[in-house]
Each structure stands twice: as C-alpha cells, then as structure tokens.
C-alpha cells in the first residue's frame, strides 16, 4: 500500500500567481515563473534515487532543491567550498544518481563521473502547461526531503536525514512564533548548503508564499538596499551582525533600513551582548536569537516584541520539548539560571537518523531512538522565566575547574563585553590543581595595545564569578571559523 501523501510543502506553487517569489543577484522569479522552472526540472529528475545539488549562492540552487522536493527525490546540498577529500566522502556516502548545477558552474574532479543536469530558470517558458508536479505516491511525511551533512569537526561528516515532516513542522513552528506570513520579504546572504540559509532562508519564505531576496554575498550595502526597498525580515549570523554594528555609526541609510525591519534574526552561534546593544542603541530594534542544529532544525526562539534578552535563545517552539540533563542522567527540574545540563530535545522537528550510520543514530538518543530524546551535545542553563541560555558544547566548551562545571560561552560573552576585545574563544586545558584551567584566546581590538591578562581576568570575575576568570590569555590575529562563522576550537594552536 502506498504511503499517505504529504500535504504540499509549497502551497503557493500549487496555484501560482505573479507575486514575487525569489530574487538573487540579476535573477528574479515570480511564483508563476518559479513553478514553471521547478516543474520542468522535477519532471526531468522524477524517479531518481538521490540528487546532489551544487549549492552555490544563486537562484538556481533554490530551483534545484525545490524541484527535488516537488519530485519526491532526496536532495543532497553540496558546499562549493568543500575540499576534494570531504566531497568524495559525501558523494561516496550518499551515492547520488545526478548532480544539479547552474550551466556556468565548474564542478570539481570528484563530481566528474556523475551525470549532470543543468538547472535553467527560463527553459520552461515555452511550455505554458508546465507547472508544479505533485510528489509521487511514495513521498509521505516520513520520506526524506534533504540529506544535510554535518561539519565533521569530530570525524567524517555524517548525513542527516531530514524528512518532509520535520521540514514542515519546523518552518510552521517558526511561522507561529514569529508571525511569519506571505506578506514578509526575507533578506539574507547565508550559504545555501546548510539548514540556516537553505531550509529557513529559502524554503521558509516559499512555504509561506512570501518573497526571499538573497544577496549572493553578504554586505552592509546589500542589506540596506533590500530592507529599504520592501524587506521586512533579515536573517544573519553573528559575524554579519558584528559587521553591521561596525557600519552603523557612519551609515545613516543602514540605520534607517534596520530600524524599519519587522524582524532581525541571528543564529548558528551566540550573538555577543555588545553587538546586541550597539544595534539596539542605533536602530531601536532588538535582534532575536533562535537555537537549532542540523539534526533538530529549530528548537527554541526568543519571541519578537518582548524585552531584549541578550545571551538567551528563548523558549521552546510550538510542538518542541526541551529538557536539561545532568551527567548522571537525572533531569534538572529547577530554573536557577546557574546549573548546567545537556540539552535534550523531542518533537516533530527531529531528524530521522544518520545515513548509513544506525549505530550513531541509536547512540544519539537518550535510551536509544525509542526513547525519543535527542542528545544535542549542547550545554545550557534555564532561567527563572523558562528561557534557555546556551553555555557551550559538551565536547569542547564544558570546563570542569575547581569542582565547578563552567560553560565557555558565558565567559566568551563576558570577554567580548570588554572594549579591548574584538574576538574571543575559551577552552579548558589540564591543570594539576584545578583539574582544568580556563584559557582565553583573544583577538584584541587594537593589536598594538592589547588589554593586560589581569585586566581581562578581573573583568570576567566582576561580570560572572571569580572561579570563571581565565587563568591564561593567549593573543591571536584571528580565530579559525567555518562558513557559518562558528569558531573551530580544535584548530586553535596548543601552547
């Protein structure tokens, strides 16, 4: 018996109109034009097992992914900046039958043996009957929509299986939390190979029937231009908001554009308190933070319109359960804003498993998959009002020093509050007395005049607690980061 069909992921493509849908650089498509383009491509790839998508920051990437979803074919977004070894691993693991790419894209050697389908934006115009095709009977809610690969910081990248159910549930929960409607125009310049830029930033607006304007590459000028010409929402990562905060004092047009936006959202890493404050002071707008990951899509969000809460990621989204768990497996019951626990998540937003890794899938859940609670590996505290404050990753950011469990994230935020610090990362290293000592990696605002170690230690102790002060400070020219701006702590030099 055929699996029940999913409700359409993109209702606006079922009866398309001339409303704007997508713009990226020189390419712009209405819903009618998008329906023709994705319908024609979906018809070409229907019946394929999996398809790889060369996820360059172009309109063709959006067309390719939406076409695959409409055809009921799992799409594997490929990071154009992946090295050949990583790319070969992903292709060998996911075994796509085709690669979808823009006609002008030059593909690297690992893709040479894979049949290629060029993605066209206007090729279907000659056939006015071409439009969105319904998914085949096998594309039920639990069928795989996307296979998104993890960053591979603790081993080879794993393929995260995201179902149609998970994509729809997460986007609809965000729509409820953010009052996201077809009237919204989303602006962003995020990469299109990952959850933030692709699922939230492209599929989110199209599911609502609204418009997305992708900048191609991030710039303050692009943000100001698109928000000033009708944009209502901006998605970004902390690096982007830091650059906007730097640009605001000398750019009245940017101030006006951000002031007029309905919603400013930051994700993928914590936004420093100082950047929150600089943007709010200049524009009167509060940046909303949310929390998610490849395996869970979105878990929590600060709600728009409430008081500013820098450093927190809000409360669970509709349908999502969140609990904090001690190392001994006991569930934290209180909300004291101090006790650290690992974040466990349960809900319709969860992934279906890791491709070809049933062992890793089983191990990722507390009590196995049947238990339903996914271990995120993130450490957090719960404030008295129920909001979640992340303090770091269990593997790299939980420091056990002098009998205390300390999250690196809150120390990093405290360091960033010092005017002499441009960037900061915090790690632990073995100490014969404390167990672990806190090490601060600092990029000074003025390399010629960095703040003294004792000054930074006192600054942290004053804002947090004496036992959280760094014992060692190491200066760097820059911090190693990935494409989403997250600091790669395993690449920090070991002194």
Image: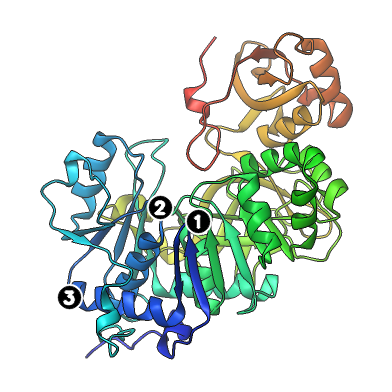
What residue is drawn where x is 64% and y is 78%? 183
**Secondary structure state at the residue bearing disc 2:** loop
Q: Reply above or below: 59 against 248.
A: below
Say which residue appears at 37% left-offset and 51% top-offset.
56
User: Can residue 290 be seen here?
Assistant: no
Q: Is residue 326 above or below residue 488?
A: below
Identify residue for label 3: 47
Q: Residues within 10 Å of mark 1 (few under 14, many from 20)?
A: many
Question: Which of the two labelled residues, at mark 3 and mark 2, occupies the earlier sequence position?
Answer: 3
In the visual, does 169 lie left or right of 224?
left
- Report whether 143 appears left or right of 439: left
Instruction: Establish if 22 lies above or below 481.
Output: below
* Gap in angstroms between the C-alphas marked 1 and 3: 27 Å
Disc 2 from disc 1: Cα separation: 7 Å
Q: Going from the N terminus, do you reach mark 1 or mark 3 first? A: 3
Q: What is the distance, in whole Å, between disc 3 and disc 2 at their CAs? A: 23 Å
For this orientation, the residue located farthest to the left is 113
In the rendered image, residue 112, in percent from the top left (x then y), is placed at 14, 46
Residue 185 pos. (x, y %): 62, 69
| Residue 454, quarter of the rendered image | top right
Left or right of 329, for residue 74: left
* Labelled disc at residue 197: 1
For the residue pair 212 and 483, the one nearer the viewer reads as 212
Between 441 and 482, the one lying in front of the other is 482
Residue, disc 2? 193
> Could you tell me residue 330's position as x and y percent?
63, 51
Check if mark 2's residue and mark 1's residue have beta carbons within 8 Å: yes
Residue 448 in picture, x, y percent from top left: 72, 8
- Local crowd size for mark 2, using a 10 Å CA cut-off: few (<14), some (14–19), many (≥20): many
Q: Contact, CB < 8 Å: mark 1 with mark 3?
A: no
């Amino acid at each position: 018996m055929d699996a029940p069909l999913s409700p359409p992921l993109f209702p606006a493509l079922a009866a398309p109109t001339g409303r704007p849908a997508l713009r990226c650089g020189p390419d712009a498509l209405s819903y009618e034009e998008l329906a023709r383009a994705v319908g024609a491509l979906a018809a070409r790839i229907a019946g394929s097992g999996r398809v790889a998508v060369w996820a360059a920051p172009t309109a063709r990437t959006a067309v390719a992914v939406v076409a695959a979803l409409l055809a009921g074919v799992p799409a594997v977004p490929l990071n154009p900046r992946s090295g050949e070894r990583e790319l070969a691993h992903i292709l060998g693991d996911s075994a796509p039958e085709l690669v979808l790419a823009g006609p002008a894209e030059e593909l690297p050697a690992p893709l040479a043996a894979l049949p290629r389908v060029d993605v066209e934006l206007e090729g279907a115009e000659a056939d006015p009957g071409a439009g969105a095709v319904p998914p085949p009977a096998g594309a039920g809610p639990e069928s795989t929509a996307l296979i998104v690969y993890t960053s591979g910081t603790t081993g080879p990248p794993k393929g995260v299986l995201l179902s149609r159910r998970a994509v729809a549930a997460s986007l609809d929960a965000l729509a409820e939390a953010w009052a996201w409607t077809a009237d919204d125009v989303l602006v962003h310049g995020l990469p299109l190979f990952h959850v933030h830029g692709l699922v939230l930033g492209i599929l989110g607006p199209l599911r609502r029937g609204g418009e997305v304007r992708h900048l191609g590459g991030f710039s303050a000028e692009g943000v100001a231009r698109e928000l000033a010409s009708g944009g209502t929402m901006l998605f970004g990562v902390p690096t982007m908001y830091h650059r906007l905060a730097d640009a605001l004092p000398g750019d009245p047009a940017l101030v006006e554009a951000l002031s007029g936006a309905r919603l400013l959202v930051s994700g993928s890493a914590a936004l420093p308190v100082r950047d929150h404050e600089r943007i709010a002071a200049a524009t009167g707008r509060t940046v909303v933070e949310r929390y998610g990951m490849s395996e869970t899509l979105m878990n929590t969000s600060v709600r728009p319109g409430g008081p500013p809460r820098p450093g927190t990621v809000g409360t669970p989204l509709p349908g999502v359960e969140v609990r904090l768990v001690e190392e001994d497996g006991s569930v934290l019951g209180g909300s004291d804003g101090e006790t650290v626990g690992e974040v466990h998540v349960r809900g319709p937003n969860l992934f279906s498993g890791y491709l070809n890794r049933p062992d890793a899938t089983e191990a990722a859940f507390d009590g196995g998959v049947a238990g339903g609670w996914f271990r995120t590996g993130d450490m957090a505290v719960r404030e008295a009002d129920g909001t979640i404050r992340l303090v770091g990753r269990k593997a790299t950011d939980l420091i056990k020093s002098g009998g205390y469990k300390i999250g690196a994230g809150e120390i990093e935020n405290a360091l960033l509050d010092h005017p002499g610090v441009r960037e900061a990362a915090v790690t632990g290293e073995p100490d014969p007395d404390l167990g672990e000592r806190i090490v601060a990696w600092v990029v000074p605002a003025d390399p010629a005049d960095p703040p003294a170690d004792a000054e930074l230690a006192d600054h942290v102790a004053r804002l947090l607690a004496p036992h959280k002060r760094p014992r060692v400070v190491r200066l760097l020219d820059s911090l190693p980061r990935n494409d989403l701006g997250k600091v790669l702590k395993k690449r920090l030099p070991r002194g």
